[in-house]
Image (cartoon, helix red, strand yellow):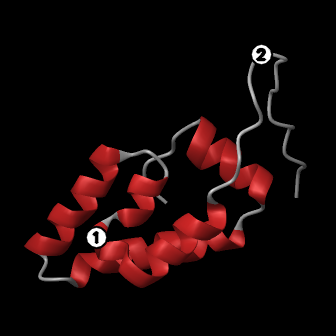
Amino acid sequence: MSAMPPLPQSSSTPPVQSQRVLAGVMGLLVGGLGIHRFVLGDTQGGLLRILISFITCGIGSLIGFVEGIIYLTKSDEEFVRVYQVEKKGWF
């Protein structure tokens, strides 16, 4: 497995605090409500998760559950890079 490059840090930018545990737990518990995406600052993604759960009568909430598991299995550095800096939207 290749090593991840360190997060770019400039002297004017404060380090980004990882929201991995909070977003992961919210994804596991209430993934269908998209709260884990709102925690990450992705309002559009959160609203989309709510819409998917509503249209599929709750079955679409499994997407949030799976995302929660994925979040919790990543390292803090990888999570910050992928979901908070690069703002990856799905899985």
Residue in the picture at 88% in, 58% down: 1
**Amino acid under disc 1:** Leu
Marks 2, 1: nearer the viewer = 2
Is label 2 in contact with label 1 (beta carbons under 8 Å)?
no
Q: Nearer the viewer, residue 41 or 71?
A: 41
- Regarding mark 1 in the picture, which secondary structure is present there? helix
Q: Nearer the viewer, residue 70 or 19?
A: 19
The numbered mark at residue 33 is 1
Dot 2, how many residues are within 10 Å of its Cα: few (below 14), some (14-19), or many (20+)? few
Q: Nearer the viewer, residue 29 or 60?
A: 29
Quadrant housing residue 49:
bottom left
**Amino acid under disc 2:** Ser
Figure disc tally? 2
> Label 2 vs label 1: CA separation?
35 Å
Quadrant housing residue 47:
bottom left
Q: Is residue 89 left or right of residue 84?
A: left
What is the x, y in percent for residue 24? 56, 71
Q: Is residue 36 left or right of residue 47?
A: right
Residue at mark 2 = 12
Q: Is residue 14 left or right of residue 90?
A: right
Q: Is residue 75 above or below residue 8?
A: below
Residue in the picture at 86% in, 37% down: 6
Dot 1, how many residues are within 10 Å of its Cα: few (below 14), some (14-19), or many (20+)? many
What is the x, y in percent for residue 70? 59, 70
Residue in the picture at 88% in, 51% down: 2
Residue in the picture at 54% in, 77% down: 25
Mark with earlier residue (2, 1): 2
